[in-house]
């Protein structure tokens, strides 16, 4: 069961709201509620409202489809904060000038879905597939190949000469 909630033009910058939304992304809904409840950030109040709305939307959808739904098993599947329209204002400055003030807004979007256990379980993999998984070495995310140093180059050339 998936549901979403969007709040548009929240009067807080997206950069500040992202600090809070990053903390709840992928978490269980009760845990996300706790994080938002005890956060000192003002953005946590707005995000809490959106999360509450998404959970209520999930309940309504389950009720419409006559499906059982346990709110405690919902997870925050997708949570983003995008920039909204900027309100442009001006304030007086020295020597008759005016300096601009940008009052930034943001859009908050949260998707919740039922826990993975409610979905169909994955089938067991074949022997060849499991064998390939055990043989292949794990790859680190973002890992880059290093350039060989002079010492490793010298060692390789020495091995080549010995093998000839």
Image: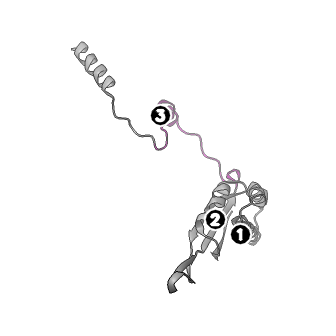
Decide: few, some or many residues near mark 3? Use Cα within 10 Å; few <14, some 14-19, many ≥20.
Answer: few
Question: How has the structure been colored for display?
Answer: one colour
Query: Residue at point 60% right, 72% down?
Result: 106
Comparing 122 with 98, the one in front is 98
Identify the residue under disc 3. 132
Comparing 128 with 92, the one in front is 92
Q: Position of residue 102 (x, y in %)?
A: 56, 77
Comparing 121 with 89, the one in front is 89
Residues tagged 3 and 1 counted as in contact (Cβ below 8 A): no
Q: Position of residue 112 (x, y in %)?
A: 68, 62
Q: Secondary structure at mark 1?
A: helix
Residue 111 falls within the magenta-colored stretch = no
User: Reading the chain from its start, which is encountered first: label 2 or label 1?
Assistant: 2
Q: Which of labels 3 and 2 is toward the front?
A: 2
Q: Which of labels 3 and 1 is toward the front?
A: 1
Task: Measure how far apart labels 2 and 1 are at the Cα level.
Answer: 9 Å
Q: Is residue 55 left or right of residue 133?
A: right
Q: Which residues are magenta?
A: 115-142
Q: Is residue 38 above or below residue 160?
A: below
User: Reading the chain from its start, which is encountered first: label 3 or label 1?
Assistant: 1
Identify the residue under disc 1. 46
- Quadrant location, the N terminus: bottom right
Q: Position of residue 77 (x, y in %)?
A: 64, 58
Residue 123 falls within the magenta-colored stretch = yes
Decide: few, some or many residues near mark 2? Use Cα within 10 Å; few <14, some 14-19, many ≥20.
Answer: many
């Amino acid at each position: 069961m998936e549901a979403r909630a969007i709040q548009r033009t929240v009067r807080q910058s997206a950069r500040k709201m992202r600090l809070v939304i990053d903390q709840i992304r992928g978490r269980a809904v009760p845990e996300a509620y706790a994080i938002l409840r005890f956060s000192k950030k003002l953005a946590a109040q707005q995000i809490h409202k959106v999360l509450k709305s998404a959970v209520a939307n999930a309940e309504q959808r389950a009720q419409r489809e006559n499906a059982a739904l346990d709110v405690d098993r919902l997870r925050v599947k997708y949570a983003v904060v995008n920039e909204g329209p900027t309100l442009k204002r001006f304030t007086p400055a020295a020597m008759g000038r005016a300096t601009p003030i940008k009052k930034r807004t943001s859009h908050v979007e949260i998707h919740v879905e039922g826990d993975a256990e409610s979905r169909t379980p994955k089938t067991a993999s074949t022997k060849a597939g499991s064998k390939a998984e055990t043989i292949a070495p794990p790859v680190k995310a973002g890992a880059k190949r290093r350039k060989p140093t002079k010492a490793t180059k010298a060692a390789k050339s020495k091995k080549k000469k010995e093998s000839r």
